[in-house]
């Protein structure tokens, strides 16, 4: 009797493992993550290409919000350490972050020129790092190299058009970059799913 109950227990355990995402295998989780990230990036990329002005403003506002959040955290940190020495410099640091974030949020058009320069440099460095790290990849190494080269090319386009076409370039290029990265992530995810099945 005990022998007949064992397979039932084993099959129910397997069913629970399949339904519980935290128990899924690394390959399965990686596949789902790649496909989900790919679809989201493609949708955001299409939005950026269709409406580059709004995409550029959205990126700039997001960046400004992050800087303001960092400033608030620095202010909280400075307040907690107010009894220690050097509190003036901590408050000054928080004020710099808050001031920079406020400028980005209150005058997004001017902030876009600076943001375009930062994005251009970031894309170039990110692309170069992707190409260098592709040598250590076990799966779809060529796609990672292609992704890195595209990133460096897009960064070069942003820097070439700076500062005259900052708004249009930031929105369009960020949209293209997101869409291409999404397609590559989707291809990697689906090919991994096919390979495991």
Image (cartoon, rainbow, N blue to C red):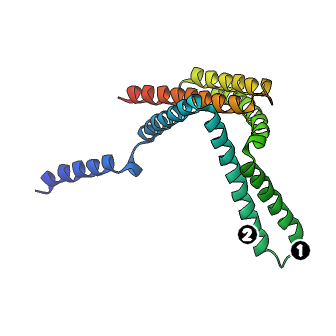
Quadrant position of the C terminus in the picture: top left
Q: Which of disc 2 and disc 1 is earlier in sequence?
A: 2
Q: Is residue 145 above or below residue 38?
A: above
| CB within 8 Å, label 1 to label 2 | no
Which residue is depicted at the point 29% across and 51% down?
A: 16
- Choose between 181 and 142: the one closer to the eye: 181
Q: Residue 101 vs residue 175: left or right? A: right
Which residue is depicted at the point 62% across and 25% down?
A: 147
Q: Residue 44 vs residue 154: left or right? A: left
- Choose between 101 and 186: the one closer to the eye: 101
Residue 137 in sight: no
Residue 184 in sight: yes
Which residue is depicted at the point 74% across and 32% down?
A: 166
Quadrant position of the N terminus in the picture: bottom left
Q: Residues within 10 Å of mark 2 (few under 14, many from 20)?
A: some
Residue lying at the far left in this picture: please name it.
Answer: 1
Q: CA distance from mark 1 to mark 2?
A: 16 Å
Per the image, label 2 sits on a secondary structure element best described as helix
Residue 159, percent across and down?
Answer: 78, 27
Which residue is depicted at the point 75% across and 74% down?
A: 80
Q: Residue 34 vs residue 113: left or right? A: left
Residue 192, percent across and down?
Answer: 44, 29
Residue 76: which numbered mark, if any?
A: 2
Per the image, label 1 sits on a secondary structure element best described as loop
Residue lying at the far bottom in this picture: please name it.
Answer: 83
Residue 85: which numbered mark, if any?
A: 1
Q: Nearer the viewer, mark 1 or mark 2?
A: 2
């Amino acid at each position: 009797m005990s022998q007949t109950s064992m397979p039932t227990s084993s099959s129910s355990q397997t069913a629970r493992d399949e339904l519980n995402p935290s128990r899924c295998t690394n390959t399965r989780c990686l596949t789902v993550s790649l496909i989900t990230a790919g679809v989201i990036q493609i949708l955001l990329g299409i939005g950026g290409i269709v409406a580059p002005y709004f995409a550029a403003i959205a990126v700039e506002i997001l960046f400004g919000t992050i800087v303001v959040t960092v400033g608030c955290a620095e202010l909280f940190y400075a307040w907690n350490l107010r009894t220690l020495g050097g509190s003036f410099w901590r408050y000054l640091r928080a004020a710099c972050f808050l001031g920079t974030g406020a400028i980005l949020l209150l005058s997004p058009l001017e902030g876009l020129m600076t943001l375009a320069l930062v994005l251009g440099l970031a894309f170039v460095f990110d692309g170069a790092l992707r190409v260098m790290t592709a040598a250590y990849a076990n799966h779809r190494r060529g796609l990672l190299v292609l992704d890195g080269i595209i990133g460096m090319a897009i960064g070069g386009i942003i820097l070439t058009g700076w500062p005259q076409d900052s708004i249009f370039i930031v929105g369009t290029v960020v949209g293209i970059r997101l869409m291409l990265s999404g397609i590559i992530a989707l291809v990697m995810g689906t090919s991994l799913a096919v390979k495991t099945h």
